Image (spheres, rainbow, N blue to C red):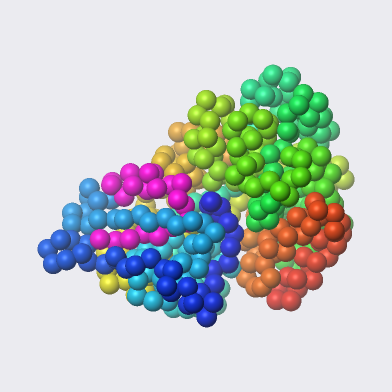
Amino acid sequence: MTPRSWKHLAVTIGAGALALTACAPSSDTGTSGEGDGTTLTVWSWRVEDQAAYDKIFDVYESKHEGVTVEFKPFKATEYNKILATGLAGSDGPDIPQVRSYGQLQATVASGALLPLDGQVDLSSWDENVVASAKGKEDGKIYSVPLARQATVLFYNKKLFADNGIDVPTTWDDFIKANDTLLGAGVTPLAVGAKDDWTLPIVHEVLGGARFGGAAFQEAVLTGEKDFTDPDWVASVEVLKSLEKYMPKNVTGVAVTDAMTLFTAGRAAMYPGGSYDLATLQKGNPEMEIGVLQVPPATGAPAGSEATTAGWADGNFAVNSKSPDKEAALELVKWMATPEFGQLVADEVKQISAVPGVTYADPVLEEISANYDSNGSPYLLLTDFRYGTPTGTELLGKGVQEMFLGSKDAKTVSSDLDTGVKTWFKPVS
């Protein structure tokens, strides 16, 4: 969800994925050799977390004699196909990092994952987080959630101070801040619209309060409203109205380029996810990063407040074909403990899914606090990825086309509504 953490790409298992068998990594999972102990492989799309996981698994190895854990990350845009191929054959990982919610379902249906009911206790966890790990049809738990992700508007505190800008608490203040930065020759919003997967996240950051956050979720799931609702359309229009504050030719700017603009001090704000924090801090360790919640845009529903949208992602599961299922299960059970959760917070710089974790990083602590106090669901991910086309795919491509001038906000919203209604049925 790096994503990079979250590329928000659907896991595809089928003939198309099987055709990639020749591209799948060669097998080096399972027990090494007689007397050599057990080597477990953990696959992930988080290349940037290699060093962090090496430290985390060193802790596990120190308490489990004879067990070696190898963390093997792959390029995020290639990961889903590589994983599907590995799980379909005999050379997959012992512990795959899997997607969540709707994107988990194809993997569950393939029989590739070991059910974890009775093995892990998630009864005290956030229900929305636990839902990310369950099979839609049977309700069984198939993975242990790694983290709670949240949408975030990061800002450069020095650039704000240098330009006399306080953290905006109203929409007018937010627009004035953007105008001030633009007038000073600073790009206000570092957006990379070349990568359409990120645009639904940008929409949540900048427009979530405009469509009504959690209140809209309830209305759309029951069928009281849909994505042609004026408040939703207006939230998409918010992005178009803010385009002038984004890099020029924004559809030609990649997410990595946008992040570089921010860490280099040439852009003042970066709309992304909590998973981006560690990467931004590595990009410029000297930068003092702040986070803010965007106030509701003009015309927002009565009672709307600034919100931080959240979801669960990056869950870990047990490969049902692993030659070392018992050892793999022990590792995944450990991933549900406070010890692992704290290591994730400290080393990976993510908001752990494990309850009770504390955060030494003040930025991460603030993101977590914002989500706890003003949280809402990342709607198109938590509820509109259980069919094809997915909500995030439709909105991402639609907003990209809006920036290119071929669609307006009303058409983007109508296409989203039509697309998800091919499979989505409201809960009566």
| In this rendering, position of residue 56 left or right of residue 362 | left
The residue lying furthest to the left in this view is 35
Q: Residue at x 78, y 37 (%)?
A: 245
Magenta: predominant secondary structure element?
helix
Q: Which residues are magenta?
A: 39-59
Residue 372 seen in render = no
Whether residue 318 is in magenta: the answer is: no
Q: Nearer the viewer, residue 176 or 393?
A: 393
Q: Nearer the viewer, residue 126 or 4?
A: 4
The quadrant of the image that shows the C terminus is bottom right
Whether residue 52 is in magenta: the answer is: yes
Q: Residue at x 77, y 40 (%)?
A: 248
Q: Residue at x 38, y 56 (%)?
A: 72
Q: Nearer the viewer, residue 294 or 264?
A: 264
Q: Residue at x 63, y 25 (%)?
A: 157
Q: Position of residue 274 (x, y in %)?
A: 56, 44
| In this rendering, position of residue 318 left or right of residue 202 | left
Q: Position of residue 133 (x, y in %)?
A: 50, 64
Q: Position of residue 99 (x, y in %)?
A: 52, 62
| Number of numbered callouts drawn | 0
* Residue 390 higher or lower than 149, as above or below: below
